[in-house]
Amino acid sequence: MNRALAVPAAVALLLVAGCTNDFSPQSDLLAMRVLAIQATPVELLPTEDVRVVARNYLQSDVVEAHWTFCPLSAGAVSAYACAVHGPRCEIPLTPAPDGSVTTNPTANILDCLASLGVTAPVLPPASQVLTVFRYRAVTTSGAVREAILQVPQWTGAPPSGWERNIPPGIQEVLIGGVQVWAGGHATGTPPNLPLNGTLPVELRIDPATVQNYTDAAGVVQTEAMTGYFYTSGGTFSSGITSGVDTTTNLEGTGIPPGQTTAEVWVVALDLRGGQ
């Protein structure tokens, strides 16, 4: 089963050309976009390696890609700036040929502090810190796209009964009632999208990947699953849904004259870092 985050649900969806629309919703893919960032594993024990990869629409338009790692973020108010000795601890990472980066956050943290002559702080054995991976891509047009992913890192042995977070599993995607994605690969061809008509797009998340967890207040919660929908032709009536089996409509509006196919991308998130 594919537990990866962003999947191209259909790459040969036939369209009927129409007039363009001046307003572009968030779900419309008009240029290179970072749709998701996947970490494997999603949640780290001490000394574990992690692999992080960006899922881009129009990957071929990326001419430069830069990754950095920071032991701790200062939060959204500061645009997730590095909170540990500022930029001095924002460590550059070298991507592999496939664009991913693999690193050991524990080693990075200790190396950075040692280089600064700082003794590693003593933290409670069952605490977590949110490490930050920052991705910066430059496109053929010179546009810059940035995205960050916070990866929880245990500073010691997790509490008894802890279960590692796993990403949502995309069980299947259906377009117009036709299964187009299942088991990690494309499975069928969707019907044509008629001009000014609609096609339902259904996302089914594997219930086995929906976990219970204990929040900061000690209350047991069930993960809330969210779906994000994107298209390079037409537009979605709603680009965001909630639940394990949800449907939104792809509308045949705003299609530029001459465009005959579109890509549809679906991203599943568990709102705890799994994408």
Image (tube, rainbow, N blue to C red):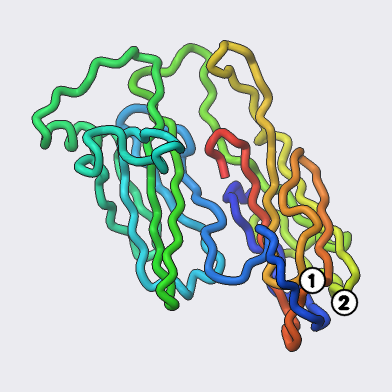
Judge left or right: residue 182 versus residue 192: left
Q: Nearer the viewer, residue 37 or 134?
A: 134
Residue type at mark 2 is: Leu
Q: Nearer the viewer, residue 162 or 92?
A: 92
Residue corresponding to mark 2:
195
Q: CA distance from mark 1 to mark 2?
A: 18 Å
Q: Position of residue 166 (x, y in %)?
A: 56, 36
Report the mark closest to the observer, 1 or 2: 2
Which residue appears at 36% of the width and 63% of the height? 65
User: Residue 189's mark?
Assistant: 1
Residue type at mark 1 is: Thr
Q: Is residue 121 above or below residue 91?
A: above
Mark 1 or 2 closer to N-term? 1
Quarter of the rendering containing residue 53: bottom left
Q: Is residue 53 above or below residue 242?
A: below
Which residue appears at 34% of the width and 19% of the height? 156
Which residue appears at 81% of the width and 81% of the height? 18
